[in-house]
Amino acid sequence: MWMTRLPEVPVKAVLVSGEYPRLISALQRLGITTISTKRDFRLPEPVSWHPDMQVCLLKEKMFVLRASPTKEILWQAGLPAQETEKSPGKWYPQDVLCNVLAWDNYVMGNLKTADPNIVSMADKLGMQWLAVKQGYTACSTVLVDHSSAITADLGVSRQLNRNGMRVLEIQPGCIGLPGYDTGLLGGCCGKIAPDKLVFSGQLDSHPEGWIIREFLASREIQAIELLPGELIDVGGIMAVL
């Protein structure tokens, strides 16, 4: 099984926050099976349901937080996730153990905050680590395709540019995340097919929504807005099957 943020075929199932039933229903109306996270009370409350805070995908491997309540859900769905070495905590950097982003033969994240089991597995799989200071790498980055991305983080943008990717830099903020000042665009979306990127809300709610839409169109990617209203950081929509 090869799990990736950049599916080569239409996805059958996604991992999504169990906090948003309307989002789950919208995905199911597209014919996609949803696997819902459980809340992990060890994480900060605003992100305690977030897939990208609980789970990390590395090629055919999946990691889940140690003693996570979501682990049983994954196993029941036929997704045998390995546990992180460390347990999460309420404060940064203890909350970002799984918040790294992998695609193709790359894995991007902060080596000081990523869980040692994830770092070790990436090395065993022969993946190239793209080191950044941003601990919330997965939340911060939208993988558009194999050679382009969107982010508001300048460090992430520089690292991706150095590795030959075309990057759209957007202004920070303007993303809903109740309990925090702002969310991050990578946490609002996920690929469900090679040419389809779903968003939790409407791009027009973002001041640079039209720029994002044009960038996606230039890459021949269709933006699908699942719900009306503002973009909400839901911890990403993670293709798993």
Image (cartoon, grey):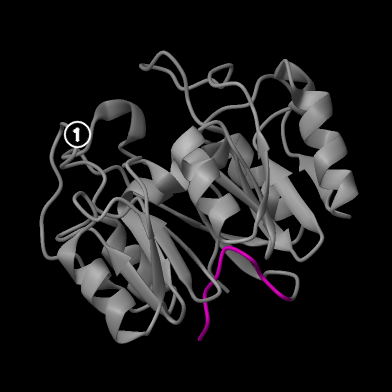
Left or right for 127, reference 135: right
Q: Residue 30: percent from the left, percent from the top? A: 77, 55
Q: Is residue 4 visible?
A: yes
Highlighted range, magenta: 1-8
Residue type at mark 1 is Tyr
Q: Residue 78: percent from the left, percent from the top? A: 42, 80
The residue wearing badge 1 is: 92
Left or right for 132, reference 5: left
Which quadrant does the C terminus fall into? bottom right
Q: Is residue 93 above or below residue 34?
A: above
Asked if the magenta segment contains residue 153, the reply would be no
Q: Residue 88: percent from the left, percent from the top? A: 15, 47
Q: Is residue 17 visible?
A: no
Q: Nearer the viewer, residue 172 or 165?
A: 165
Residue 58: image quadrant is: bottom left
Q: Nearer the viewer, residue 29 or 142?
A: 142
Q: Nearer the viewer, residue 76 or 131?
A: 131
